[in-house]
Image (cartoon, coloured by chain):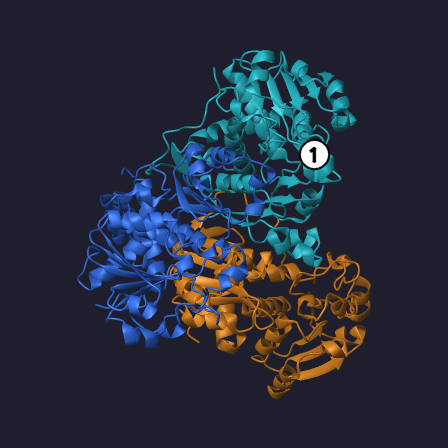
Chain colours: A orange, B blue, C cyan
Amino acid sequence: MDFVGSHIISVDQFDREAADRVFAVADRMRPYANRQRITRVLQGAILSNMFFEPSTRTRVSFGSAFNLLGGEVRETSEVKASSLTKGESLYDTARVLSGYSDIIVMRHPESGSVAEFAEASRVPVINGGDGPNEHPSQALLDLYTMRTEMAAQARTLDGMTIALVGDLRYGRAVHSLCKLLCLYDQVKLHLIAPPELSIPEEIEKKLVADGHQVETFIDMAKGISDVDIIYVTRTQEERFPSPEDADRYKGLFRLNQTIYTQNCAPNTVIMHPLPRDSREQAQELDDDLNQNPNLAIFRQTDNGMLVRMALFALVLDVVDEVDNHAQPVTWFTSKRLPDSPPQ
Amino acid sequence: MDFVGSHIISVDQFDREAADRVFAVADRMRPYANRQRITRVLQGAILSNMFFEPSTRTRVSFGSAFNLLGGEVRETSEVKASSLTKGESLYDTARVLSGYSDIIVMRHPESGSVAEFAEASRVPVINGGDGPNEHPSQALLDLYTMRTEMAAQARTLDGMTIALVGDLRYGRAVHSLCKLLCLYDQVKLHLIAPPELSIPEEIEKKLVADGHQVETFIDMAKGISDVDIIYVTRTQEERFPSPEDADRYKGLFRLNQTIYTQNCAPNTVIMHPLPRDSREQAQELDDDLNQNPNLAIFRQTDNGMLVRMALFALVLDVVDEVDNHAQPVTWFTSKRLPDSPPQ
Amino acid sequence: MDFVGSHIISVDQFDREAADRVFAVADRMRPYANRQRITRVLQGAILSNMFFEPSTRTRVSFGSAFNLLGGEVRETSEVKASSLTKGESLYDTARVLSGYSDIIVMRHPESGSVAEFAEASRVPVINGGDGPNEHPSQALLDLYTMRTEMAAQARTLDGMTIALVGDLRYGRAVHSLCKLLCLYDQVKLHLIAPPELSIPEEIEKKLVADGHQVETFIDMAKGISDVDIIYVTRTQEERFPSPEDADRYKGLFRLNQTIYTQNCAPNTVIMHPLPRDSREQAQELDDDLNQNPNLAIFRQTDNGMLVRMALFALVLDVVDEVDNHAQPVTWFTSKRLPDSPPQ
């Protein structure tokens, strides 16, 4: 895969070499994200951060990643503020917006919209989530986190056992992650979901066809014992026919410290694409796990910065220039560095 | 007209010399907008991009134009987020906001609001659209596009024939454009509109009084033959008493490739202030025109960047400093340069 | 108080020395806010300007203050765009967002929310208003304004007489201001409010316990004679059980030029935390005061920039670096400098 000038629309674009390239560049972004130094490599470049569906977290993450490389960010955060509501085609929107910036991140509620948009764009487009379809930077940061967590235990992604817990039917994060996992060797997957929310058949088939082992569980306690990583997801209520339909599945699987201690191997990593639902009826990951050093959910979001910086640097072809534009940080930086995975 | 420190509120402020000055400066902005180089001339300056009515396109265009000159942008995109809803006067809002920035772009749904705001502002204000009244940067970019399209055919604005098509009653873009056209010599205008949506009488009178030729058409095919430029507009549904009233006029005039080929002289330029309505009931400009090299609608929006950069540079008095703060672009820039008009 | 790396959550954190330190640094920010020069001291730093409740004015003020120091701003302006609506805890939001930036300003509708958020944040957090509770930068800019207005009359804050007018029950600005006033010596306060909207008892008690003089008035004309400063507030309708409840108190106290001339000592300063309600039924400060040189309301908001720049510089430990990164301003700057207090 040649990153330079490419659109990043789907995890299907990535082979193992491409994913590993992203991760290697992400590693090199760490001193900038940790404020040990700054870089001005993209000074003068403009990102159009177009969110036609609300998502504070992802929007700010992409925007900050671009700022960390020295670039400027223009953005929108609402579909109703857009010409799309006046009957403008994605083709027109793309032709117009691509005259305003050097690169575009786009989130949009409709499947396939970002690919259609990218086709008409003169500048590279990164998919920030197109409805139930794809959110490739999330899948990449999840896999990057698995890689760094395993590395701290002197392991690699090959041969890992991962439990996927929750709404495996509607969770696009899980679907994209499974596709990326297929790039590695002999992954074992424990799929823990109510039958109505089980993973789409074609994804399970692909995993098996690619030589991975898939086992299905209804009992969470059984499914999470003897795994390396537990990846918990929220119920994707926005994809259900009605909120009441979604409510039936909230709180079905709850992981807390007691259940963890009773069932999990030491150092079992806990992940979640966030936001986790902390309301009483949900609590898929109990707050009492917050002190558990294996809770990697905030390392995931921190890693999101590294992966998004890496994608920008690769697509805009400045990977080898980043360090040449480095400068020292002269203001107060937090004494509290991001968590590291336990060794 | 002295641009330095001035408010840009209305096309009425412009004489021919002033318009030509904007266009000459816009020409000089092209290498920056095309990413052949960057400039940091406004490093440290702040634009307050205050949109009290949604408009993603215009807001991002002004913001990017300021970023391209090296400045920072603070913005708002919603009236409900504003103190205006708590009974604050425009006077107060202006006094407050003008302490936060070096220049303000303001869009507001009420006619005359931006002028009232500007009167109390300590810093220059550019009208980004005040309801049905004025949107001077749109009119300037339209005229600038006409000028560059004609120049590619070794013509000038003087003596042009232009067909204006659609909702000529409510379209402020058309009204402002006509006022600017009055600055040039012997323009011929074909006004194509249903009688209920014909151009306001005072505008037609002014055109005639200034020595231009005005002809009215109900049949589009007749009106667009033998013209240099066809300028199509959308039905301004937000100005109609009800959406149903507006719907009656949608789709009344549709230009497509077949009609174009049958009726138009070669190289007749097609323009539209955008967004064009691509819904089936409207389609004022059919998608099959997208491959027509005379479709200038995306050159228009690209030119918008140049014209807005020019206005900022003129008002903030940095025109002759822009090139002194130029730097090379070191990241990937698109191989797909903006369209050029056919020669 | 050690500012470096601290959260700024409440005026209770400030002793007299700390407040005076903020004011001394604010004084040094004036040439940058007045565009006599720029500074790049925070180039590469990122502010997350998180407004989970709308407030154009305060949001833009914080953002511009950070830009004036050379930093970048990422922001959100709406609760509905946020994961908070998906059941995410403030703990999670803080852990996530603090990985995106160097400092966070947060506004949130719930009392205590910003303190809870700050506890989980890895980077310093400044309270931009947590519902009815605190808005420390507003109180600091109010006190800073009193100090500069009094200084122009060769006076100090010690021994001042201040009339507080309006909704003293729900106005958090007034409450925080009173707490700060307690740091100074022998302040005299005239409290002018309808009995139902009188100041909370604990605040009045604290003022008296700290040696200040408090007098209560129902008649505004009496309360504002023979004072140094009149501080008028709006009815905080969002805190009332219903808009109708609030409406009963609008327009109860109206200050205009005639009343001012008839009752006030010369050079009595008029302040208001803004926005002032200029609708007919309210008009707590009549527009005919706009030409009164003692109307300090716009000097207040201008001072807000200085105070917010000072807080950023103190917390991020760059106070003594600001001038080292100074550069000349090369663009047009307004001939209309901010008002100065009459001498």
Residue B206: image location, x then y, percent: 29, 47
User: Quick check: C170 left or right of B101?
Assistant: right
Q: Looking at the image, is B98 positioned above or below residue B292?
A: above
What residue does disc 1 label?
Answer: C247
Residue B266 location, quadrant:
bottom left
Q: Quadrant of the N terminus of chain C?
A: top right
Outermost residue to the left: B154
Task: Residue at 67% x, 28% y: name it.
Answer: C174
Identity, as a three-letter code, of the amino acid under mark 1? Asp
Chain letter belonging to callout 1: C
Q: Nearer the viewer, residue A299 or B132?
A: B132
Q: Nearer the viewer, residue A197 or B25?
A: B25
Residue A262 location, quadrant:
bottom right
**Residue C183 in view of the camera:** no
User: Quick check: C45 left or right of A169?
Assistant: left
User: Quick check: B241 left or right of B291?
Assistant: right
